[in-house]
Image (cartoon, helix red, strand yellow):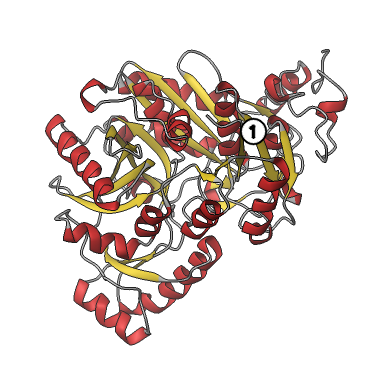
């Protein structure tokens, strides 16, 4: 097993991985940009290394600086989290040459599934159903327009080098194609350093269902069931749950076996997610492989009892997968909401600024994977996710009701967040009925506005702040110690203190 792992990420996912390292008795190294000098992941780690200015291209996407941090700290392995370099085959190959373990798929598999077009061709050859679309990247405008007419409008523009909603645009007719291509290429370049895109038939009103898969380096593969990910804004998931209300046992088994076959075809190892779209007739089509830990992995953990980050680390260390498909089962129902710093009433525009007060919900069946605290300033440079709120209960309806109450208890003052919007989504009758296709937000929340709060809400919030309990998690108050080169922080120098009240 590794003695020290460098976490090449930030925010809530970096905190999540650092916690897993701590549980396994592994030292954790954080990296941070100038904007993240006071980040929670920096406070949580055993060591922290500055890797450059705030823009991601100069820090979290800068391979030279990350490799230098690995060398300086003696880390044996790198966990990339999600985003940034997590699906970058060049980064994985460089680490391999440097004798450093990449906690993710091998470079060949990463290169295959990371190139969405190559992956589509490989799956089609293996007999796996795919969505009709282009087999090579979009070239000049005339060729692309001809491909769109052949596929049939509407078409989806997608980034070849990555997912997560980055670079996605829909063209409903030829007049939309040029602007959509330009916007998609620009966003893909910023997110992945590669502006290549391709076209795919846009399936209207589908279900987006993905299967979590684990594979070791000895040919053992299992799936850990599905996640329904159809509640989306701007082609990015905001609510995920398992099991899916849309799947029956037979369909679940067929899709799970197909997901495992996708990994076999790819020569894949470590954790991955195979994504599918399902039409109204429950026909399913391979969409892509997300070759990393997913944002929504906690719902799988809560229903299977398996820690996916632990599994990633053990597989990367060369251990055999100690799981068999027949022994795996789900218990209960779990739902996750992504908590973003954004304004849902204003086209989900990011919201930066200082968090004046922060309190996470708690209670039976409630989990928060967070990366922020009271007094921290949310930067503009990165994805605006702050935390993930996840609940578990015996049934879907109990989980839904528990999530509504948890969202009511979630307090974030000082910036706009998605909390009130998510509360209304989870409370909606169509969500209660399980009618959760990808058009859900557009159908029912196109002109959403937050209901005006009562006059006493702010007074109550400030009174609660004065009584204390608004500070960062206790386990991280003095976690970083006096590491050489660590950024200055009152959390280390002043001991156990909090905003308001007495320690």
> Which residue is disc 1 drawn over?
28
Q: Position of residue 423 (x, y in %)?
A: 47, 32
Left/right of residue 144 with respect to residue 319 in the rendered view: left
Q: Residue furthest right?
A: 494
Left/right of residue 482 with respect to residue 308 in the rendered view: right
Q: Position of residue 52 (x, y in %)?
A: 74, 55
Q: Residue at x 41, y 30 (%)?
A: 319
Q: Quadrant of residue 44?
A: top right
Q: Residue at x 48, y 33 (%)?
A: 313
Q: Residue at x 83, y 12 (%)?
A: 502
392 or 8: nearer the viewer: 8
Q: Is residue 447 above or below residue 296?
A: below
Left/right of residue 145 with respect to residue 1 in the rendered view: left
Q: Is residue 347 visible?
A: no
309 or 203: nearer the viewer: 309
359 or 262: nearer the viewer: 262
Left/right of residue 421 with respect to residue 331 in the rendered view: right
356 or 187: nearer the viewer: 187
Say which element carries label 1. strand
Q: Position of residue 451 (x, y in %)?
A: 53, 37
Q: Is residue 301 visible?
A: yes
Q: Quadrant of residue 444?
A: top left
Q: Position of residue 260 (x, y in %)?
A: 24, 41
Q: Quadrant of the C terminus?
A: top right
């Amino acid at each position: 097993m590794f003695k020290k792992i460098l976490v090449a990420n930030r925010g809530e996912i970096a905190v999540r991985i650092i916690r897993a390292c701590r549980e396994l008795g592994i030292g954790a190294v954080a990296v941070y940009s100038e904007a993240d000098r006071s980040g929670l992941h920096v406070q949580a780690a055993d060591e922290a290394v500055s890797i450059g200015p705030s823009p991601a291209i100069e820090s979290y996407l800068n391979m030279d600086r990350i490799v230098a941090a690995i060398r300086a700290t003696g880390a044996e392995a790198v966990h990339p989290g999600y985003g940034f370099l997590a699906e970058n085959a060049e980064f994985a190959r460089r680490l391999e040459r440097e004798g450093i373990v990449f906690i993710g798929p091998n470079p060949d598999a990463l290169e295959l599934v990371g190139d969405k077009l190559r992956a589509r061709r490989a799956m089609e050859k293996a007999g796996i159903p795919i969505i009709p679309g282009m087999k090579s990247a979009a070239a000049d405008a005339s060729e692309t327009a001809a491909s769109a007419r052949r596929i049939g409008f509407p078409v989806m523009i997608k980034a070849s080098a990555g997912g997560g909603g980055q670079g996605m645009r829909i063209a409903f007719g030829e007049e939309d194609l040029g602007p959509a291509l330009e916007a998609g290429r620009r966003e893909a370049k910023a997110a992945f350093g590669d502006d290549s895109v391709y076209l795919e038939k846009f399936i209207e009103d589908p279900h987006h269902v993905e299967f979590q898969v684990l594979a070791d380096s000895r040919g053992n593969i299992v799936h850990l069931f599905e996640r329904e990910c159809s509640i989306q804004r701007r082609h990015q998931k905001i609510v995920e749950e398992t099991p899916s209300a849309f799947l029956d046992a037979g369909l679940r088994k067929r899709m799970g076996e197909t997901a495992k076959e996708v990994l076999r075809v790819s020569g894949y190892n470590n954790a991955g997610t195979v994504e599918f779209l399902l039409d109204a007739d429950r026909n399913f089509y391979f969409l892509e492989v997300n070759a990393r830990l997913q944002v929504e992995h906690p719902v799988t953990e809560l229903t299977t009892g398996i820690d996916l980050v632990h599994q990633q680390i053990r597989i990367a260390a060369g251990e055999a997968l100690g799981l068999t498909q027949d022994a795996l089962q789900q218990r209960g129902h779990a739902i996750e909401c992504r908590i973003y710093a954004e304004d849902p009433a204003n086209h989900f525009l990011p919201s930066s600024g200082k968090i004046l007060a922060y309190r996470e919900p708690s209670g039976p069946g409630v989990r928060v994977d967070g990366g922020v605290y009271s007094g921290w300033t949310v930067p503009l440079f990165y994805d605006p996710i702050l935390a993930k709120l996840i609940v578990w209960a015996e049934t879907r309806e109990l989980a839904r009701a528990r999530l509504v109450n948890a969202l009511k208890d979630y307090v974030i003052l000082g910036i706009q967040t998605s909390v009130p919007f998510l509360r209304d989504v989870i409370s909606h009758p169509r969500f209660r009925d399980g009618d959760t296709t990808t058009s859900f937000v557009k159908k029912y929340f196109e002109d959403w506005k937050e209901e005006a709060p009562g006059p006493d809400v702010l007074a109550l919030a400030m009174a609660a702040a004065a009584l204390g309990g608004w500070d960062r998690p206790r386990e991280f108050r003095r976690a970083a110690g006096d590491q050489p080169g660590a950024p200055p922080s009152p959390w280390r120098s002043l001991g156990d203190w909090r905003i308001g009240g007495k320690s």
